[in-house]
Image: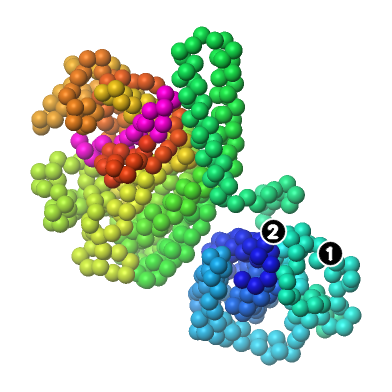
Amino acid sequence: MSGNDDIAADFLVEASEIAERLGDELVQLEIKPQDGELLNAIFRGFHTIKGGASFLNFGELVELCHGVEEMFDLLRKGRLSVDGDLFDLAQGALDQLTGQLASLRNGQPAQRAPETLLNAIRIAALPDAAAAAAAKPAVAPKRAPAAPKPVAAASALADEPATAGDAITEDEFEALLDMFQGANQVPAGKPSPLPPSPVHMPAAAREPAPEPAAAAPTKAAPPAESSVRVDTKRLDGLMNLVGELVLARNRMKALRRHTRDEDLERAVSNLDVVTARLQAEVMRVRMQPVGRAFSRFPKVARDVARTLKKEVNVQLIGEDTELDKNLVEALSDPLVHLVRNAIDHGIEAPDKRETIGKPRAGTLKLSAQQEGDHIVIIVSDDGGGIDPDMLRTKAREKGLIDADTAARLSPIEALQLIFLPGFSTKDQATEVSGRGVGMDVVKSKLSELNGQVLIESVRGEGTRFVIRVPLTLAILPTLMVSVADRPYALPLSNVLEVFKYRENLVRFIDGREVLDLRQQTFPLIFLRRWLGKPVVTEDAGVVVVQTPTRKLGIVVDQVRGREEVVVKPLPASLRGLTGLAAATITGDGNLALILDIGGLNSAV
């Protein structure tokens, strides 16, 4: 990097935020190509990044942004119209810009955009080339008043030279210096004097341009002095400390049970309240809208649909739903798999949809909503649906299950076969799918996040992937149980009810124990037997949990009660074992294993 590291770091953060916003705006532009407000916003975004990049001598970014800026200047003046080719150019330029910013953030030099892309962008502006040449020096477009510092200031310094009488005053120059010195110092090695402000041509020589449209009514940004940019590593460290505080609190609560000291009782109660409040506040700071993960999917859907010659409309619902920032990032790849799968396997070709009375364009919906301490994300399509019998046949043909197992599967259980490693309904691989990878990766990744995924499908109507993940990965509400004097934790969100074990509720079906409860039967798993220990049912309890496909009864020696635990990685010797999700430290200082409900379900 050239220039001052602190200013460059600020620029990269703010430019990345602008680039992310540009991605959303380009998606909206494809839907509303005549929206002047969007055209102005996109123009300002590229212009602002160009200015900051010019100040910091990032020439590759300047060259790319300048071309796109010129193109959008023509668009907002009505001299060009948005079509598929032009939209592809803008999207390609944004992809390149995003890659350049990522390289700079990683301490690598930015690569120049491909010459083919740069030439195509220049050619797009050719209809106005003569007028642009005649109008040199160019008119600097009006910038948004809320452009970020120091990017906006750098943009002002980096525009074309001013004509006589339009240079900035000494006071304005000092103000700009103060702005940069607020972030630290002006970069060393910058030529002096600094370039003057953007040119303002006399009214007679200036071509009238439309004023930028007023911004859409959104939540007002907080004043600059009321917010502070914090490195995410500091937030992670803060959350780890809160986790340790929770462990200490749990230990104090355990000790309190063995004493009758009123002062200690009050102190522990106060500690419990303060810890809960602190935990809630830190979690709130770490929250991000799930829309950050959703924002990339309209482009993903558009690219896949174009490759497959399909038509798709994408609807995003509940983008403001907030989730732990680590989960937002971790969910991105699994959701990409589901989006690609829905378009490839689910939504039919336009001609076929017309023949069966459907609109030519399919609909893909991504929705998010909070349910208690979990987030539910649904990816649904209005395609042809999935045939459970076809999945059974494919799984048998590939040797993934035997005929007897396939015959016993209910329709909803058969749908879950799609998550088996190596399973694919494609006979021939394509660039989109058919290689037997993807859906098993989705399930594995969600299991790592203590999440679950369930498929629901109706032939001819469509398919829904329902994902449930906790609000945070750091602290988990659990039901603590014990088996053979060892503690275990069950995620509380899966627990439906708890009762004392009774022999008269147990039946045998196909040689397997099932629980017959209120005219419902579901599998029963004895944790002692699962752990390789003799079964003891005297004084045992039953915990009924909900898995993605069915209810499951888990027989334990003792139910200890609810406890919020700090999630820790499994010891190396236990990683990869079915039925184990993570570990934690209990209030009495012992290691407890957090059970994976989905893994237990597959073991029955």
- Asked if residue 80 can be seen in this view, the reply is no
Q: Residue at x 50, y 77 (%)?
A: 85
Residue with the mark numbered 1: 175
Closer to us: 120 or 359: 120
Q: Which residue is drawn at 63% across and 50% down?
A: 230
Q: Which residue is drawn at 33% across and 29% down?
A: 488
Label 2 neighbour load within 10 Å: few <14, some 14-19, many 20+: few
Tell me whether circle 2 and circle 1 mark residues in contact (CB < 8 Å).
Answer: no
* Element at label 1: helix
The picture quadrant where one finds residue 107 is bottom right
Q: Which of marks 2 and 1 is nearer the N terminus?
A: 1
Closer to us: 261 or 514: 261
Q: How many labels does the image show?
A: 2
Closer to us: 411 or 251: 251
Label 1 neighbour load within 10 Å: few <14, some 14-19, many 20+: few
Task: Give amino acid for label 2.
Answer: Ala
Residue 72 position, x and y percent, is 63, 75
